[in-house]
Every structure is written in C-alpha cells, then in structure tokens.
Amino acid sequence: MLRLAIFLAACAAVLSAHAREGYAPVVPGARLAFPADRGSHPKHRIEWWYVTGHLESARGPLGFQVTFFRLRNKEAEANPSRFAPTQLLFAHAALAEPAHGQLRHDQRIARALPGLAEAREGETNVFIDDWSLRREPDRYVARIPGQGFTLDLALAPSQPVLLQGEGGYSRKGPNPAQASYYYSEPNLAATGSVTVGGERLAVRGHAWLDHEWSSEILAGEAVGWDWAGINLDGGGALMAFRLRDKAGATVWAGGTKREADGRTRTFRENEVAWAPLRSWKSPRTGVTYPVGMRFTAAGEAWTLEPLLDDQELDSRASTGTLYWEGAVRASGPGGAKGSGYLELTGYGRALAF
C-alpha cells in the first residue's frame, strides 16, 4: 500500500493544492514494463520503494523495513540552479527485535544531487549518501548503516512480479484519478547480516517489496489507512488494504491474493473488511493502535498478531507524524500461516494530505 504518511508531512509545503497540475497522470490500461518500471518515474508526483521482511538470527526473530521516497517538487523547476530541489528524496529504516521491546529506527532526507542522492531511471537504484537500495542482475541489495543498527541484505526474487489492481493500476478512492501504478515482489529470499549492539548477526528469511508511483492525493475524506502484505507459507502472497474516514468507516478497500501455483485474484472494494481484535496504547504518545487485526478478503478471514506490540514510529520531531508499522504473523483458513507487515496510520490524528 502507501508509504506516504511520514513523507507527505515532511513535504507538505510542496504538496499544496495549488501545485497539483502538470504531473504525469495514472490511467487505467497502461502496461508496466520491466526492468524500466523498476526505476524512477520523475514526471509523476510521488513514488516509493518499500521493503519489509522477517529474518532469523542467533538472537531470535527480527523484522526489518527499508523505504525510499521520491517527490517531484514542480515549484522549484523554474530555478536554473543545479542545486534547486526539483526532486526530494526521503528514506526510513527500522528494525524490530522482540527482546529489545521496541523499534530501532532512523531516517534520511535530501534534495536529489547526482552522485549524492538519486532515484535513477531504468532500474531500481535509489540512494541517499551511504543508504541505498539497488537492483543487481539477480537480486536487490539494501545497505543501511543506521543509528544503532546496520542492515546489509541481499533480496533474491523467487517468483514473478505481482501486478496489483488492474494490471498494475491500483485504485485508492472513488475517483478513478485517485490511483497509483503498483506492483509487488513477494517471497524475496533474504540473506545477509544485521549489526546491532556491536554484534554482527548472519540472517536469513523472506521479504516483500512494493513499488508505487502516483500523482494524485488520496480522497479528502480519508484520515488514514490499514495495510498488510503477507508472505504465505508454501509460496503464496496476500495483500489487503482499506482507507478510513474520521468515523472509522471504509472509504475504499482492495487487495490481491496469489496462490503458490500462480493463480491470482484481485479483490474488489466491497470484498475486503477489517476489524480490530486487540489494541495497544503507546506509553510515549498516548495513541492507541489496533495491533491485533482481522481482515476478511472474499470471505476468507485472516488474523494478524504482531511480533511485538511496540512498533510505533514517532517522527514528530522531524515530520509531525505518528504511525504504527510492524512485523506480524498471519493465520488464515484451513490452518494457513504466513508472515509480513501491518501498517496503521491516522490513529493519533488525521494525516495531512
């Protein structure tokens, strides 16, 4: 789903309503092409590459998240300076370790400058200084030397790309323009190392990559969203989301399930429903999040339980945003199991779109 919460708040000035014209649109029927569409789309307004996963280590299970965002700042394009902030980049990373009890996380932000901070076209290659996510011939490589932890991971595709929505055109609201181009790469085989507390740990597990780009902000009545991406045991993949209004009602919903044999079903907006099962209240911010969740997709009920409750990301000092994004385990019909990530936004206050 969307990784916009922290990014939109940080870049609110350039996302103002009077600056929305002149961006490349998202339209149904467009065909995504690879490898080109794995790279940047600088004519569109916003874009993000988002990788999450579960890892096994000598210290026990770990969850990780790496996100890179790109924003086209059209208002700066008239400035002839090579230092004009025509493209803004933002990155966020987090590590979940149950024994630690809460997230370790760090972030970066920069204007795009060749060689220093870029989101390159043609293939996945995004970086801010020494933080990077790059596609090599047979794998992605993520290198994140963060504050208090370091991620050095290879992520090898084991399945074809999963196009979300209608062939990669993913609706996010009742207006057809409220949409993104969106594909996923589930069940990435993750290997490498995580360094934490001065200890370098060999790790192995599975990851999920989302890549989306868009030019239209979400429906005005939406105050937040719930999203989950789950790697199912046995090789399947499941994604579901909903956008909520201030009363908690669903504004829009959707998702996709791909079986291990490749059979794929896209869920319509009326086929996905979410229900909180258990809440956790942050001792730092006072915000209550439904960290235990159940969603039903085309009649199949799935239950999500977090690896640890305290996976809140508090970015008020830099972006003013609070949200919960964490590693979860999933259980479904017939004893089906899986692991993935759950994102909960707009629970402390409405997101500023």
Image: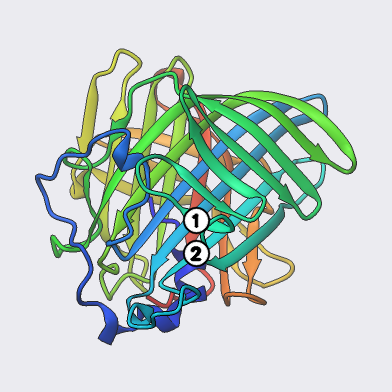
What residue does disc 2 label?
112
Q: Position of residue 25 (x, y in %)?
A: 18, 61
For the residues labelled 2 and 1, say whether their Cβ atoms are less than 8 Å apart: yes
Q: Residue at the far right: name it.
A: 198
Q: Earlier in the sequence, mark 2 or mark 1?
A: 2
Density class for disc 1 (Cα within 10 Å; few <14, some 14-19, many ≥20) is many
Which residue is found at the position 27% from the left and 75% from the top?
220
Q: Which dot marks residue 118?
A: 1
The number of callouts visible is 2
Query: Where is 139 relative to 3, above or below?
Result: above
Quadrant of residue 36 in the image?
top left
Q: Is residue 142 rendered to the left or right of residue 49?
A: right
Residue 300 seen in the figure: yes
197 or 248: nearer the viewer: 197
Residue type, numbered disc 2: Ala
Q: Work out how far the residue at label 2 is from the one at label 1, CA to CA, in angstroms.
A: 5 Å
Quadrant of residue 246 in the image?
bottom left
Q: Is residue 11 rendered to the left or right of residue 110?
A: left
Q: Is residue 281 rendered to the left or right of residue 265?
A: right
Which secondary structure, mark 1? strand
Which secondary structure, mark 2? loop
Residue 278 seen in the figure: no
Query: Where is 121 relative to 263, above or below?
Result: below
Q: Position of residue 108 (x, y in %)?
A: 63, 62
Density class for disc 2 (Cα within 10 Å; few <14, some 14-19, many ≥20) is many
Q: Position of residue 153 (x, y in %)?
A: 64, 32
Query: Where is 178 relative to 275, above or below?
Result: below
180 or 84: nearer the viewer: 84
Which residue is found at the position 59% from the left and 58% from the top?
116
Which residue is found at the position 45% from the left and 48% from the top?
49
Q: Say which quadrant the C terminus sits in.
A: bottom left
Q: Position of residue 124 (x, y in %)?
A: 43, 41
